[in-house]
C-alpha cells in the first residue's frame, strides 16, 4: 500500500538530493518497519526525491524526472513483491495526461492510472496530477479532490511536491487562512528544523541557505 509514499515528504525535506543513494537509503530505513517491499520503497523514494529536488530549487518537471530515477534505485531494496514497475508507471502516467485539458486528464487518471490505495496506482496518479496542474500546489489539491478514490494520499503527494517546488509564497493566502486546527507557527518551526538537518548533512547552516 501507499502509506510510505504518503508520509515520506519530511525525509525529502531533510535529505539533500545528492548523493541519491544516501537519500534512497534513508527512505528504505523509514520503510523497514511497516513497508519493507520493493514497490513501497520505490514509491516512497520517488516522492522523497521529488520533494528534495524542489527544496533544492528544482522545478516540478525536474522533480518528476528525479522521482523516476529514484524509483529505479528504490526498487532494488526491500523484499521483492510482484506489481507494476513504479518508475515506468510514473513516466507513463505523466506522458498520458501531458497537454490534456483538466477534465480529460482527470478521466484518464481515473480510468487508466487508477486512484486506489495500491502504490502502483496512487503514486503514478499523483505525478499525473502534478503534470496537469503545471506544478501549481492549489490546482494540484483541487484536481485531486475531484478524482475520487484515495484522494487524501494522492493529494498529499501531488500538492506536497508542488509546494516543495513552488515555495510557500505560491500558496493562496486566503485558503491557508481558512485552515482549522493548524498552528502555522508550529508548521514553520518543524520545517525549519528539517531544513537545518538538511543543511548539516551538506555541511552548510540554515543561515547559509537563507543567503
Image (cartoon, rainbow, N blue to C red):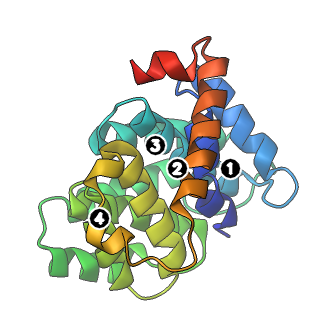
Q: Could you say whether the residue bearing mark 3 is in a helix, strand or loop? A: helix
Q: What SS does tag 1 mark?
A: helix
Q: Could you tell me how far apart the alpha carbons at marks 2 and 4 are, in whole angstroms?
A: 25 Å
Pointer 3 residue: 50
Q: Say which quarter of the image contains residue 57.
A: top left
| Viewer-proximal residue among 160 and 206 | 206
Q: Is residue 180 above or below residue 154?
A: below
Q: Are marks 3 and 4 in contact (CB under 8 Å)?
A: no
Query: Which residue is denoted by mark 4 in the rendering?
Result: 173
Label 2 and label 1: CA atoms lie apart by: 10 Å
Question: Which residue is rendered at x = 44% and y = 70% of the image?
Answer: 155
Mark 2 or mark 1: name the one nearer the start of the chain: 1
Label located before the other in sequence (3 or 4): 3
**Dot 3 crowding, Cα within 10 Å, few <14, some 14–19, many 20+:** many
Query: Between marks 4 and 1, how big is the CA–CA gap?
Result: 34 Å
**Looking at the picture, does residue 21 appear above or below residue 70?**
above
**Residue carrying label 1:** 41
User: CA–CA distance between discs 3 and 2?
Assistant: 5 Å
Mark closest to the chain's N terminus, 2 or 4: 2
Q: Name the element at disc 2.
A: helix
Q: Mark 3 vs mark 1: give the one in front.
A: 3
Q: Which of labels 3 and 4 is toward the front?
A: 4
Q: Position of residue 96 (x, y in %)?
A: 25, 63
Which of the 4 image quadrants contains residue 35? Answer: bottom right
Q: Is residue 208 above or below residue 49?
A: above
Disc sitting over residue 28 in the figure: none
Check disc 2 and report the residue beneath it.
Answer: 47
On screen, residue 211 above or below 7: above
Which of the two discs, 3 and 1, labels the residue nearer the N terminus? 1
Amino acid at each position: 500500500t501507499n502509506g510510505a509514499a504518503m508520509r515520506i515528504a519530511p525525509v525529502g525535506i531533510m535529505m539533500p538530493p545528492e548523493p541519491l543513494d544516501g537519500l534512497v537509503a534513508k527512505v528504505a530505513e523509514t520503510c523497514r518497519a511497516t513497508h519493507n517491499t520493493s514497490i513501497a520503497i520505490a514509491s516512497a523514494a520517488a516522492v522523497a526525491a521529488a520533494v528534495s529536488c524542489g527544496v533544492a530549487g528544482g522545478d516540478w518537471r525536474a522533480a518528476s524526472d528525479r522521482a523516476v530515477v529514484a524509483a529505479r534505485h528504490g526498487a532494488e531494496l526491500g523484499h521483492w513483491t510482484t506489481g507494476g514497475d513504479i518508475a515506468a508507471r510514473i513516466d507513463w502516467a505523466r506522458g498520458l495526461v501531458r497537454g490534456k485539458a483538466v477534465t480529460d486528464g482527470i478521466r484518464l487518471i481515473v480510468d487508466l492510472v487508477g486512484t486506489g490505495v495500491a502504490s502502483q496506482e496512487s503514486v503514478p496518479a499523483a505525478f499525473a496530477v502534478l503534470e496537469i496542474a503545471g506544478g501549481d500546489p492549489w490546482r494540484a489539491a483541487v484536481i485531486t479532490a475531484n478524482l475520487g478514490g484515495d484522494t487524501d494520499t494522492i493529494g498529499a503527494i501531488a500538492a506536497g511536491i508542488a509546494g516543495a517546488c513552488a515555495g510557500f509564497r505560491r500558496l493562496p493566502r486566503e485558503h491557508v487562512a481558512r485552515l482549522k486546527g493548524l498552528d502555522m507557527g508550529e508548521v514553520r518551526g518543524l520545517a525549519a528544523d528539517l531544513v537545518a538537518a538538511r543543511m548539516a548533512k551538506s555541511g552548510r547552516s540554515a543561515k547559509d541557505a537563507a543567503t
